[in-house]
């Protein structure tokens, strides 16, 4: 890529338990040494990255660099997809994974070394990848949110609520493991009907229901080893009718190596749409961000965004 057009670097200085407050100037300086004209934009609050990405698209940005965790990347993707159709502009996305949750970078094989990640701007290959779309409904509100990695409700929503409210200095793996253990102590499974591709699949006592586009979530849990971001499908995985002890020994203890699928209370389907509905509000995790709703309809949007990846992937 030549020195122009500009690169929009959207940076969450709070990511990586504050690491980026000191690191982001070095990241920007490295981009400049590679000959890029960098427009630096720092996020100040929740969903600010969404607004910044939307403005960048309106300005016909050809490359947006996400510097932060999965939440920052999610906001940027939402800003792009909520503006791209109107502006007819779809910029290349570059991920520099520095944050509590960087599971998507594992699936996409994005280097954790920021210099190697930046080198993908000119040295990587641009690929079109799928994105999930969730339409939420509550009693008096309907809204949508896109995700690139994962949507889940039940235990996962509680884990995210805890993880987002504790200090992040443990790092991603320990933060999510600790949050999972705390959530298990207070979580009570609920009867939730689920539909997959317009067919009622189950209405048992659910612990967690997930729709995965990427393979990993929760700080390295290999939840969907079969998942692909380019196949036009989502992997639907749910756990039902189990207790805390069996959940820890058969799911939590095995999920990091992808062996939880061997447990007979873990169910897996592949498809294009998931619907979950409840009389009571449930917590949802969408790329590490929390939402609350009575109903969620999840669909796949094939080849929705362009992202720079290593050439050997």
Image (spheres, rainbow, N blue to C red):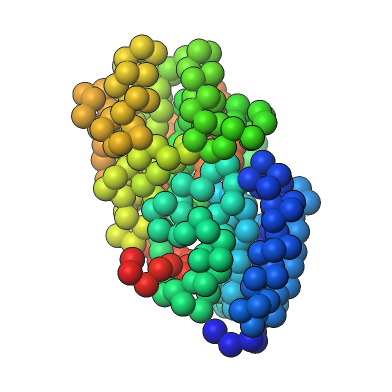
Q: Is residue 60 visible?
A: no
Front one among 49 and 188: 49
Side of 294 where 233 appears, left or right: left
Q: Is residue 64 visible?
A: yes
Q: Residue at x 37, y 25 (%)?
A: 252
Q: Is residue 153 above or below residue 107?
A: above
Query: Residue 231's x, y, as percent?
Result: 30, 60
Q: Residue at x 67, y 31 (%)?
A: 167
Side of 44 where 62 appears, left or right: left
Q: Is residue 249 above or below residue 54?
A: above
Q: Quadrant of the N terminus?
A: bottom right
Front one among 97 and 6: 97
Q: Residue at x 23, y 25 (%)?
A: 263
Query: Residue 43's x, y, as percent?
Result: 74, 55
Side of 205 where 279 appears, left or right: right
Q: Is residue 36 above or below residue 207?
A: below
Q: Is residue 105 above or below residue 128?
A: above
Query: Residue 184's x, y, as percent?
Result: 48, 17
């Amino acid at each position: 890529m030549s020195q122009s057009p500009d690169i929009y670097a959207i940076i969450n200085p709070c990511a990586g338990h504050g690491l980026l407050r000191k690191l982001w100037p070095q990241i920007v300086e490295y981009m400049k040494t590679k000959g890029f004209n960098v427009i630096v934009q720092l996020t100040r609050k929740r969903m600010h990255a969404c607004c910044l990405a939307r403005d960048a698209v309106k300005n016909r940005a050809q490359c947006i660099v996400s510097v932060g965790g999965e939440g920052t990347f999610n906001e940027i993707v939402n800003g792009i997809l909520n503006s791209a159709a109107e502006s007819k502009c779809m910029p290349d996305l570059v991920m520099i994974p520095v944050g509590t949750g960087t599971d998507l970078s594992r699936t996409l094989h994005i280097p954790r070394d920021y210099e190697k990640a930046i080198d993908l701007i000119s040295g990587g290959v641009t690929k079109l990848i799928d994105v999930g779309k969730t339409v939420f409904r509550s009693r008096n509100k309907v809204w949508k949110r896109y995700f690139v990695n994962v949507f889940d409700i039940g235990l996962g929503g509680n884990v995210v609520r805890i993880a987002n409210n504790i200090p992040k200095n443990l790092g991603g793996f320990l933060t999510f493991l600790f949050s999972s253990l705390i959530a298990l102590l207070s979580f009570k499974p609920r009867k939730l009907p689920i539909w997959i591709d317009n067919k009622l699949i189950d209405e048992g006592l659910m612990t967690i229901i997930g729709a995965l586009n990427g393979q990993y979530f929760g700080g390295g849990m290999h939840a969907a080893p079969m998942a692909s971001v380019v196949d036009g499908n989502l992997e639907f995985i749910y756990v039902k009718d189990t207790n805390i002890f069996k959940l820890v020994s058969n799911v939590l203890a095995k999920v990091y190596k992808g062996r939880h699928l061997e447990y007979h209370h873990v169910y897996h389907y592949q498809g294009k749409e998931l619907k979950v509905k409840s009389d009571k509000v449930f917590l949802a995790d969408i790329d590490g961000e929390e939402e609350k709703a009575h109903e969620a309809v999840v669909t796949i949007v094939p080849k929705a965004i362009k992202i720079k990846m290593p050439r050997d992937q």
